[in-house]
Image (tube, rainbow, N blue to C red):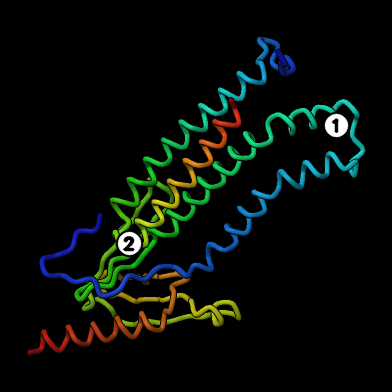
Amino acid sequence: MIQFENGEKIVKIVRRHYFVIMPMVFLMVLLALAPMIVINLLSSGFLPLDEGIKNMVEVLVSKWKVFGYSLWLLLLWILFFIEWTDYYLDLWVITDRRIVDVDQRGFFHREVTSFKFEQIQDITVETKGLVETFFKFGTLHIQTAGHNREIVIRDAHLPEDARTLILQLSEKLKSISIQ
Amino acid sequence: MQTLPDIFGWFTFSGEALADLLFFVMAAFTAGVSLVLFFHWRRYGMGGSKLAFTELIYLVVAVALLATAFFALN
């Protein structure tokens, strides 16, 4: 859980674009259809199978079709949500004082990095290729002074908006500290 | 009683017993993973109605699939 300072307000939460989980969604749909395709192939005579195997497949399908298919779908459903959780919990929280980068890698590996706006030296937005341009996502590169390294936000949705917002908040904070 | 081939050489399972075992394993797996998922969503998910709706959809579909498997078993 991210600990916020007293009076700190969340301005925006940036997540990776949903397009990055699309290959996984297609794979799940394909796997969900796979048993039907395999059973049709086996029973259609398309594959040269032994009569005994054909009979066994027919018995299995007639008796355990609903049971097996619902468990198969359940397994895919759970796997989808495990992947989705990994996607959903990978986020960047922009507050009025800092940026918190949460890197979720699997269930039990989580890295949380936070840096103040004063540490930001430069922000670059990188949009590569047709897909990223069309679906409006890209990579944000944030050069920080304190960390002495670059923080990369990959596949961020509307990276230009996030960049503008970070720069605006940074300028606002600077003007307040000068006063 | 219909039995599966004695592939391990130790014992034979009836199809029904194997299906029961499979159902039990999947139910336990679903319960375990769901607990971990809900823990993560509640602790790190930043809340919101969208996440609450996703939790509901996940749970309803998972329970429906388990129930379908259970009724197909009996």
Query: Which residue carries the number 1 mark?
Result: A54
- Nearest the viewer among B69 and B28 is B69
Chain letter for mark 2, please.
Answer: B
The label shown at residue B26 is none
What number of labels is visible? 2
- Of residues A142 and B3, the one nearer the viewer is B3
Q: Is residue B59 above or below residue A148?
A: above
Q: CA distance from mark 2 to mark 1?
A: 50 Å
Q: In percent of the image, x 19 and y 71: which residue is there?
A: A9
Query: In the image, is residue A150 above or below residue A104?
Result: below
Q: Which residue position holds label 2?
A: B49
- The amino acid on which the numbered mark 1 sits, given as a three-letter code, is Lys
Q: Nearer the viewer, residue A144 or A7?
A: A7
Quarter that holds the C terminus of chain A: bottom left
Towards the viewer: A68 or A140 = A68
Q: Secondary structure at mark 1?
A: helix
Q: Is residue A166 left or right of residue A71?
A: left
Q: Position of residue B17 (x, y in %)?
A: 60, 18
| Quadrant location, the N terminus of chain A | bottom left
Circle 2 packing at 10 Å, graded few (<14), some (14-19), many (20+), is few
Mark 1, residues whose alpha carbon is within 10 Å: few (<14), some, or many (≥20)? some
Mark 2 element type: helix
Amino acid of disc 2: Ser
Image position of B44 with respect to A54: above or below: below
Left or right, residue A64 beside residue B52: right
For the residues beneath circles 2 and 1, the answer to whether they share a chain is: no
